[in-house]
Image (spheres, coloured by chain):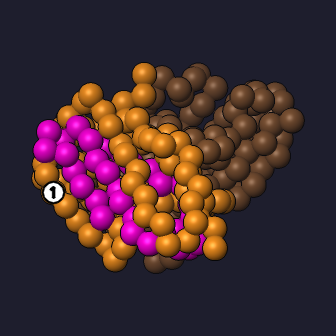
Chain colours: A brown, B orange
Amino acid sequence: DTGVSQNPRHKITKRGQNVTFRCDPISEHNRLYWYRQTLGQGPEFLTYFQNEAQLEKSRLLSDRFSAERPKGSFSTLEIQRTEQGDSAMYLCASSLDEGTVYGYTFGSGTRLTVV
Amino acid sequence: TQLLEQSPQFLSIQEGENLTVYCNSSSVFSSLQWYRQEPGEGPVLLVTVVTGGEVKKLKRLTFQFGDARKDSSLHITAAQPGDTGLYLCAGSKFQAGTALIFGKGTTLSVSS
């Protein structure tokens, strides 16, 4: 297993377009998380899944954002009608159970630039 | 409202100096984790502290969890340029099923 994989690494899109990011977690991990991070700041929680169930969503996750994790494997995060304020690094992480002992394993992120 | 406050926000020091980074909260956490992040990469776990008053050492890094489980510190001895990065603390609440809450981080720059 090569860790958490995120694609694409970079995405530049025009305002108003839709974008979709993919995350492939560590196969043994049942929990998957999405965070958003702006330059020099800590990650802000967006949502997380336990297996295929989406258990928690942040108020940061507006109606334009949707996340799925079909069959409890990979996950996608879609942003509709992108705005310039959506420009950020989108981080995916996975963990075994709650991650309180072994922590979260993060991917390298997808950097989104909305122009 | 930021649940976890980190200080200082920025730190620029010379190689060989010692430093301490703080992570404070008014909330109690079941555990705290420290991560280090390099530009263009995701955070990488350094340590997890669980017990109030716990001290853990990782080579030149010493981590402490406050007795009341509301704060933590990271002390680096004889900093090296390779220590440069964004240091993040992250707390886990007692409620089962909640995701980690991250602080805003401390950006450390160590020059030779």
Image quadrant where one finds the N terminus of chain B:
top left
* For residue A72, side relative to residue A61 (left or right): left
Chain letter for mark 1: B
Task: Quarter of the image for the C terminus of chain B: give it.
Answer: bottom right
Q: List x then y, in percent, for residue A85.
A: 72, 28
**Residue B82 sits inside the magenta stretch:** yes
Is B81 in front, or is B56?
Answer: B81
Specify the segment rendered in magenta: B62-91
Q: Residue at x 35, y 56 (%)?
A: B74
At label 1, the amino acid type is: Glu
Residue A111: tell me if it is visible: yes
Q: Secondary structure at mark 1?
A: loop
From this viewpoint, is residue A56 visible? no
The magenta stretch spans residue A25: no
Q: Position of residue A84 (x, y in %)?
A: 78, 29
Is residue A107 or residue B45 the one in the foreground?
A: B45
The crowd level at tag 1 (other Cα within 10 Å; few <14, some 14-19, many 20+) is some
- Does residue B16 sit above or below B37 in this rendering? below
Name the spot of residue A10 as percent of width and height, x first. Answer: 75, 55
Q: Is residue A34 left or right of residue B12?
A: left
Q: Is residue B20 above or below residue B82?
A: above
Q: Residue at x 55, y 56 (%)?
A: B108
Looking at the picture, how far across and down is residue A69, in whole percent? 47, 48
Residue drawn 36% across the image and 30% down it: B3
* Mark count: 1
Residue assigned mark 1: B54
Identify the residue shown where x is 50% and y is 72%.
B16
